[in-house]
């Protein structure tokens, strides 16, 4: 899509690295009593080796479904998936169920939001960890257990050999999520999909898990798709960001660019509405009015126009805006871009008046 | 400053778990003191399991405190009889995290609001009741007509507005807001925070705002109390707490909160808290945070630090600020 250099991410990934996953014109819809619901409407992206791509959006924006659909982890029917998604040379969308079984968990690893529901409560974590390795990698039980111990150690579970025969309820929430990450990594996937992987955790645990995934990514070179609604998390981890609204990508850019100079009215609105630590203002937040549309009753034209306070005219109401490249590597789906001054004012960087306290000293400030 | 709306002293809420020989005590809230002025907002923050929700429930006697004092506008809440308690509850309401779970799915939302009016005999006649419900809904940004609809017909943000309308029905002075925005979408959180702010301005409400999202808490609160394992470890004015956190736990918590600015977020140093919060059944001796504290020293296991003023109007419970507290008896 773009080749010009953007702001350089802090490690060597991005445009020059090999593309591991290439998604084109992905559409996902579901048949419902009220007609077809278009949940994902034509999204495109390339994911490079070692890269972290964040997909940001609110509930119903299609951010989770767009990745679940890649390996048909949605019920089909009523779901329907079209488009292409090349993992290396393989088009995932064209694969049969039997072929997909060899992709899920092996070439693509998953970490979901709630470790209590993604782990089976009646099996030991050892069994859940070794299952994929025995099936996908053909390891013997003894070899798989050895590797399971290594994996648990790698994700920071103390005395891993002893914990292998424990059940999920014997772990704390943070520890359970570490187990889920170990399972996600067990077959050395090329791509790890982390779907709200830290949302259910406390901030201190969230920080541990984010650091852990970043370390593992640097070690193993896998690409990560990080799905979240939390813009603070995105700022810390993402190389590139896709912002989704009503099933579409409305803005796509390098993380540093997106936060400093958002251009789509929705992205600007979202950033402006966030309370930010260190912002001394106490007045009203710049809330976006209204609600996101239901996928069964999408507005004609621009999906965001009924809530857009920047500009909303006849054209917005009737014509669907194309995704345009407004600067190298920066794509926006809107007829009107928020001008620079207004967009910078919305950014957290401009609103922070008190810097985060310096914590390098041991003990008390 | 002696006219605080709410004063809490040494509040304890203990639960028994297990039976017979396995009987153990969960010290969910273990000596909390708080003070809330009229028309102000006090934030109560901490990780899950620290006791912040139990504290909120205990203030309204929705769970019975084990010991301690709760004084609301001169009334000793713990001394109220069942009947007086019911009358008093008019003045103190609660908003919950998940408005879907806190509204009766079989009742039109107007009736959920009307129940509160009925219990306290706050309306004269059918029409007046209807008008009042409509007015409350309107006050919270909804059309009076929606009173006849059921909870499932609303979005999360709208349901939270209904929860707020119900809390306002009895014209309280004080509302405990327990994670009121945690379950809402980002673009809706600001709407609800603005509504709470507006209602406070207009009606002079005082809030106890319980949340784990420190950025939101800093935005809406006058003062912030930080809780860890059943205790308040620090309490200060909202910006003062951020500028000069005095307790190592507050410092760690603040450093873990992501800032939506990639430049700052990537340059920032973090304090990595290792391990998990210990069990409130068997908290560490002395300072409860010592097992995860990077500034721990040998006295920490021997003295249980008291919450004391360390700088002007800023309190912390940490022995680094002087070895003030209760010696541990073994």
Image: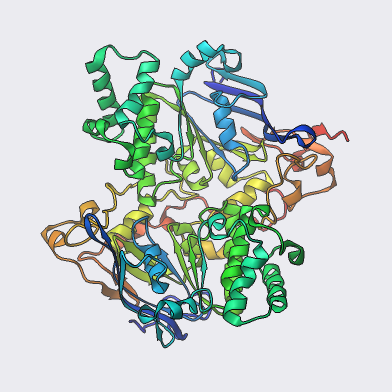
Query: Up-down: is B19 above or below B128?
Result: below
In the displayed structure, A22 sits above or below B256; it is below
Q: Nearer the viewer, residue B136 or A182?
A: A182
Q: Position of residue B144 (x, y in %)?
A: 23, 30
Q: Quadrant of residue B241?
A: top right
What is the quadrant of residue A334 in the picture?
A: bottom left
Image quarter in which the C terminus of chain B is found: top right
Residue located at (45% from left, 19% from top) = B91
Q: Residue at x 37, y 59 (%)?
A: A57
Q: Is residue B79 above or below residue B329?
A: above
Query: A93 or A1: which is nearer to us?
Result: A93
Which is more toward the observer, B323 or A288?
A: A288
Q: Is residue A3 left or right of residue A306?
A: right
Residue, far right: B330
Q: Nearer the viewer, residue A164 or A299?
A: A164
Q: Residue furthest bottom?
A: A89
Tell me if residue A285 can be seen: no
Residue A180 position, x and y percent, is 59, 64
């Amino acid at each position: 899509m773009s080749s010009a250099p953007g702001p350089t991410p802090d490690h060597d990934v991005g445009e020059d690295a090999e593309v591991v996953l290439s998604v084109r014109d992905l559409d996902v819809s579901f048949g419902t009593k009220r007609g077809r619901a278009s949940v994902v409407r034509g999204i495109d992206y390339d994911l490079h080796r070692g890269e972290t791509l964040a997909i940001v959006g609110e509930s119903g924006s299609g951010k989770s479904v767009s990745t679940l659909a890649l390996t048909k982890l949605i019920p089909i029917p009523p779901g329907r998936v079209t488009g292409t998604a090349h993992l290396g040379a393989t088009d995932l969308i064209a694969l049969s169920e039997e072929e997909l079984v060899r992709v899920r968990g092996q070439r693509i690893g998953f970490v979901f939001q709630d470790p209590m529901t993604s782990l089976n409560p009646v099996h030991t974590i050892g069994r859940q960890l070794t299952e994929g390795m025995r099936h996908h990698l053909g390891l013997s039980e003894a070899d798989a257990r050895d590797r399971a111990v290594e994996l648990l150690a790698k994700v920071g579970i103390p005395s891993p050999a002893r914990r292998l025969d424990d059940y999920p309820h014997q772990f704390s929430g943070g520890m359970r999520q570490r187990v889920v990450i170990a399972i996600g990594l067990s077959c050395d996937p090329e791509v790890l999909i982390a779907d709200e992987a830290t949302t259910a955790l406390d901030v201190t645990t969230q920080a541990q898990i984010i650091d852990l995934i970043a370390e593992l990514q640097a070690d193993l070179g896998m690409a990560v798709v990080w799905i979240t609604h939390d813009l603070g998390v995105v700022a810390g981890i993402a190389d590139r960001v896709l912002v989704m609204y009503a099933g579409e990508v409305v803005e796509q850019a390098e993380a540093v660019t997106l936060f400093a100079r958002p251009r789509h009215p929705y992205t600007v609105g979202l950033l402006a509405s966030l309370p930010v630590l260190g912002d001394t203002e106490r007045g009203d937040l710049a809330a976006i009015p209204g609600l996101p549309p239901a996928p069964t009753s999408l507005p004609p034209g621009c999906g965001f126009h009924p809530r857009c306070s920047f500009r909303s005219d006849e054209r917005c109401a009737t014509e669907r805006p194309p995704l345009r490249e407004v600067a190298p590597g920066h794509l926006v789906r809107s007829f009107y871009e928020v001008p620079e001054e207004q967009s910078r004012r919305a950014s957290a960087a401009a609103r922070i008046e008190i810097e985060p306290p310096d914590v390098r000293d041991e003990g008390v400030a | 400053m002696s006219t605080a709306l709410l004063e809490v002293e040494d509040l304890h809420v203990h639960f028994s778990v297990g039976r017979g020989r396995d009987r153990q005590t969960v010290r969910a809230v273990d000596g909390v003191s708080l003070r809330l002025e009229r028309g102000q907002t006090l934030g109560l923050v901490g990780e899950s399991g620290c006791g912040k929700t139990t504290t909120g429930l205990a203030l309204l006697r929705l769970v019975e405190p084990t010991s301690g004092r709760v004084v609301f506008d001169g009334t000793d809440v713990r001394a109220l009889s069942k009947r007086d308690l019911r009358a008093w509850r008019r003045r103190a309401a609660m908003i919950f995290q998940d408005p879907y779970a806190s509204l009766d799915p079989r009742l039109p939302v107007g009736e959920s609001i009307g129940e509160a009016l009925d219990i306290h005999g706050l309306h004269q006649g059918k029409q007046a009741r209807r008008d009042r419900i409509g007015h409350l809904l309107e006050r919270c940004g909804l059309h009076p007509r929606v009173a006849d609809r059921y909870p499932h017909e609303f979005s999360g943000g709208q349901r939270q507005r209904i929860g707020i309308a119900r809390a306002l029905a009895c014209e309280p002075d004080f509302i405990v807001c327990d994670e009121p925005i945690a379950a809402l979408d980002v673009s809706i959180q600001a709407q609800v925070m603005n509504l709470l702010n507006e209602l406070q301005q207009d009606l002079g409400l005082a809030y106890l705002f319980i949340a784990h999202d420190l950025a939101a808490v800093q935005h809406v609160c006058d003062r912030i109390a930080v809780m860890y394992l059943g205790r308040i470890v620090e309490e200060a004015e909202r910006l003062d707490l951020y500028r000069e956190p005095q307790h190592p736990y507050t410092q760690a918590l603040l450093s873990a909160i992501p800032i939506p600015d990639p430049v700052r977020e990537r340059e920032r140093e973090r304090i990595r808290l290792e391990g998990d919060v210990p069990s409130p059944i068997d908290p560490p001796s002395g300072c409860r945070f010592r097992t995860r504290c990077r500034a721990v020293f040998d006295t920490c296991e021997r003295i249980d630090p008291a919450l004391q003023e360390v700088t002007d109007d800023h309190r912390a419970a940490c022995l680094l600020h002087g070895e003030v507290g209760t010696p541990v008896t073994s």
